[in-house]
Amino acid sequence: MEQFKGGQSNPTFLITAGARRYVMRRKPPGNLLPSAHAVDREYRVLTALAGTDVPVPRTFVLCEDDSVIGTTFYVMDYVQGRILWDRSCQASSLPSAARSTTR
């Protein structure tokens, strides 16, 4: 398990298990506002979009039991892609081919 570098909010980890790769997203440590860092909402949105034309990774589990790792987290498939670090880069400004992804 290794943490992805450079994220903006929720700590995100790559989990390698044999030939499979997964991503775990969790809330950050410390006292948080009730609506902040809603990884449960992320999980529910990704799960709801599965089977639609929106390309999303397959979700596996949402764990809201803080006794497991100390906070709420979820696990999804790892999907290879590009990370756009430039905040001024908006998806609508990218050429259509650059916005296309495959599942």
Image (cartoon, rainbow, N blue to C red):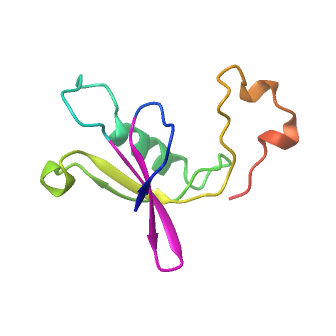
State left or right for residue 38 relative to residue 81: left
Q: Is residue 21 magenta?
A: yes
Q: Is residue 3 above or below residue 90?
A: below
Q: Which residues are magenta?
A: 10-26
The residue sitting at 74% across, 50% down in the picture is 101
Q: Name the quadrant of the C terminus.
A: bottom right
Q: Position of residue 25 (x, y in %)?
A: 39, 47
Q: Name the quadrant of the N terminus.
A: bottom left
The residue sitting at 20% across, 54% down in the picture is 69
The residue sitting at 86% across, 37% down in the picture is 96
Q: Is residue 61 above or below residue 33?
A: below
Residue extending furthest bottom? 18
Q: Position of residue 29 (x, y in %)?
A: 24, 37
Tell me which secondary structure the magenta stretch mostly adopts. strand
State left or right for residue 10 relative to residue 78: left
Q: Position of residue 90 (x, y in %)?
A: 72, 24
Q: Is residue 53 magenta?
A: no
Query: In this view of the protein, which residue sits in the foreground, 84 or 43?
Result: 84
